[in-house]
């Protein structure tokens, strides 16, 4: 509650990886927080990418992974009023979609991360990361 809020869910160009040399953190607590964040992504698509990245390390989370999770929590504190809004409208139905990916962006196993978002008028109706 007394943390410094931030405007971004993840540090720019942050590259997390599996690092057996680092100090491990409490796996149960890490998984509990990740589970809560994953539940929150149903109404907060702005954190989907960041939560997806930190979810990769639930097997052996380290201090660096926990710091990334804390950064997401600091972002949530600053953006508590954010969420999905759906408005009724009689204007033209317009479906707009966006997609992006980073090819082999994971430093550990060279996996790619992709995402997409579709809007009906101004309302986000589906997304994935």
Image: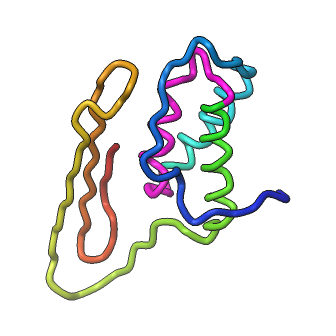
Which image quarter holds the N terminus? bottom right
Scheme of image coloration: rainbow
Residue in the image at 45% along x and 58% along y: 46
Residue 40 picture location, percent across and down: 56, 49
Q: Quadrant of residue 33?
A: top right
Q: Is residue 47 left or right of residue 35?
A: left
The foreground one among 60 and 39 is 60
Residue in the image at 62% along x and 22% along y: 61
Task: Give the residue furthest to the top.
Answer: 20
Residue in the image at 51% along x and 30% along y: 55
The foreground one among 39 and 66 is 66
Residue 101 picture location, percent across and down: 23, 44
Residue 14 picture location, percent across and down: 47, 43
Residue in the image at 60% along x and 32% along y: 65
Is residue 49 part of the magenta span, yes or no? yes
Task: Magenta stretch: give its range.
Answer: 42-63
Residue 52 picture location, percent across and down: 45, 37
Which image quarter holds the C terminus? top left
Task: Give the residue furthest to the right.
Answer: 2
22 versus 124 height, above or below = above
Task: Give the residue furthest to the front.
Answer: 21
């Amino acid at each position: 509650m007394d943390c410094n809020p931030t405007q971004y869910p993840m540090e720019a160009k942050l590259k997390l990886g599996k690092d057996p040399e680092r100090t491990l953190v409490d796996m149960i607590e890490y998984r509990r927080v990740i589970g809560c964040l994953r539940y929150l992504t149903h109404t907060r698509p702005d954190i989907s990418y960041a939560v997806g990245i930190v979810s990769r390390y639930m097997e052996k989370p380290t201090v660096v992974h926990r710091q990334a999770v804390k950064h997401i929590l600091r972002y949530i504190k600053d953006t508590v009023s954010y969420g999905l809004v759906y408005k009724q409208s009689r204007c033209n139905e317009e479906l707009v979609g966006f997609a992006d990916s980073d090819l082999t962006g994971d430093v550990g196993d060279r996996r790619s991360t992709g995402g997409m978002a579709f809007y009906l008028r101004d309302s986000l109706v589906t997304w994935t990361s």
